[in-house]
Image (tube, rainbow, N blue to C red):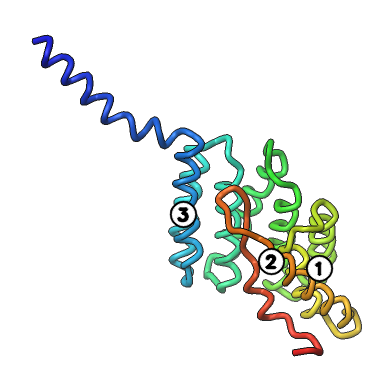
Amino acid sequence: MKTNFIYSYLLLLSLFAPVAAASGSSGYQDVMRGELAKLDSATLANDYQQCRNRFERMAQMYADEWLPVYYTAYCDIQMVYMKHANAQVLLEDAKSFLEKLDTFVGADPSEVNTLWGYYYMALTAQHVANAQNYYMEVISRYEKAIGLNPDNPRPVCLLAFFRQNMPAFMRSDRQIAEGKEKAEALFKKEIPSPDKPYWGAVYLNWIQTGNN
């Protein structure tokens, strides 16, 4: 009887051990690495939808971690850029997560402002009136992100990309070229990590300068 009790006790420990391990910081990082690998390979709106759903579940499981919240909003915004039929719903959803990030202890303010800029950039693409109403919000968010962390390549790159698509009389080709050059150098130094965002380098391919 005593042997059966010990066996049952050890069996319970073995069943709960993976759960306990996953709840620790190393467990979180392992899960995040796996989810980021899936996000890195996403190409279709459905891929991003699945990633988004998993990140939202992670945000519930790891309530003290800001990146699952960040990536949930990021996936929402990505689907808007992919001309998703529910773009308005996705934008509203992304905004709610971004507002949460604004007060999230430990969230990187440079990255949060970058994602806000990315959100407003998606919003401007939805309607001509939005472009007129929110283009300064895009610029100010990226500039704020750069001011908070000049070594963050995302706002530098995305600001150059956004300026490129502004009317000719409102943009500076020199600013765009300098922004692209700086972003290229910063992205080269960036090492992918589950502890911080590392997306955005693809936008370098879409910034045209006089040297191309």
Q: Residue furthest top?
A: 2
> In the rendering, at what x and y percent does residue 59 appear?
52, 42
Please name the residue that numbered disc 3 is placed on. Answer: 35
Q: Which residue sits at x=45%, y=46%?
A: 30
Residue placed under numbered mark 2 in the picture:
187
Q: Which residue is drawn at 48% across and 41% down?
A: 28
Mark closest to the chain's N terminus, 2 or 1? 1
Disc 2 packing (10 Å; few <14; some 14–19; many ≥20): some
- Element type at marker 3? helix
Q: What is the crowding at mark 3: few (fewer than 14 residues within 10 Å), some, or many (at least 20)?
A: some
Residue at x 81%, y 57% (from the top left corner): 150
What's the amino acid at mark 2?
Phe
Q: How much space separates mark 2 and mark 3, taking CA atoms?
A: 21 Å
* Residue 83 image position (x, y, % from top left): 56, 73
Query: Which residue in the structure is indicated by mark 1?
Result: 135
Amino acid type of the residue that numbered disc 3 sits on in the rendered structure: Glu
